[in-house]
Image: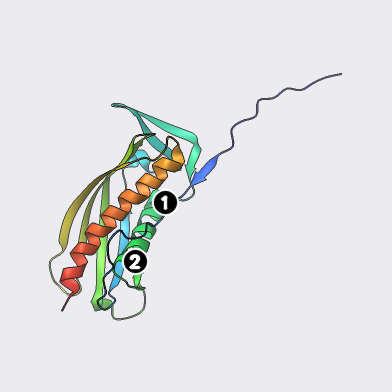
Amino acid sequence: MITLVGCASPKAQFYTLSAEAPREGVNRGSPVTVVIGAVSVPELVDRPQIVVRAGTNHVAIEEFARWAESLKSQIPHVVAADLSQLLNSPRVSTSPIGGDPTAVWRVRMDVQRFEADLGDAATVDVLWSVSPPGKASPLTGRTVVREPCTGVGYDAAVAAWSRALATVSRDVAAAIRPAASP
């Protein structure tokens, strides 16, 4: 009799970022149209595997903890969902939608840092610009957020990244709100 013994490889887990409910009152003004453009992310994290800090000069690329879709795709969708809630507008999208194209707010984001120390915190550093409708000068800002992890695993890190992106969304919404008011 022959017995085969094999090593079972770990099963991959797939993660997605999520929109967060606003922590402040939503805008009650008239809905605005906002388009979130392409988002740039650092090459280090622009991969299917989740990358976490393992030391000051050391990262871990986890083969079995993966993004369900690219960060370049997830981040704009999450920010759009957050902004839709914060601005009380169903007209926030990642692609142009119907209506007057000259009345569209355009958001661009350059993610400088997107990292986490498992069990500690997730850090997001985003340079953003908001171009108002017409030919007005863009409003620019930088949001740096360090959001504590509520646990030690990847679930907690991904949730912390989602909360950090909600803070970025609040800053972008704060730039749009006063400028959009009559």
Residue with the mark numbered 2:
85
Residue 17 shows which numbered tag?
A: 1
Precedes in sequence: disc 1 or disc 2: 1
- Residue occupying the far left of the picture: 137
User: Is 82 rendered above or below residue 146?
Assistant: below
Q: Considering the image in quadrants, where does the C terminus appear?
A: bottom left
User: Is 94 rendered above or below residue 11?
Assistant: below
Helix, strand or loop at label 1? It is: loop
Q: Residue at x 18, y 63 (%)?
A: 175
Q: Residue 29 appears at what percent x and percent y?
A: 24, 76
- Residue occupying the far top of the picture: 1
Assess disc 1: are there few (<14), some (14-19) or many (≥20) residues with their C-alpha within 10 Å of its C-alpha. Answer: many
Q: Residue at x 32, y 52 (%)?
A: 165
Q: Residue 81 appears at what percent x and percent y?
A: 37, 63
73 or 171: nearer the viewer: 171
Q: Considering the image in quadrants, where does the N terminus appear?
A: top right
Can I make out residue 131 in this image?
no
45 or 24: nearer the viewer: 24
Location of residue 152 (image quadrant): top left
Q: Residue at x 45, y 36 (%)?
A: 153
Q: Residue 55 appears at what percent x and percent y?
A: 32, 26
**Residues at discs 1 and 2 in contact (Cβ within 8 Å):** no
Kind of residue indicated by mark 1: Leu
Kind of residue indicated by mark 2: Gln
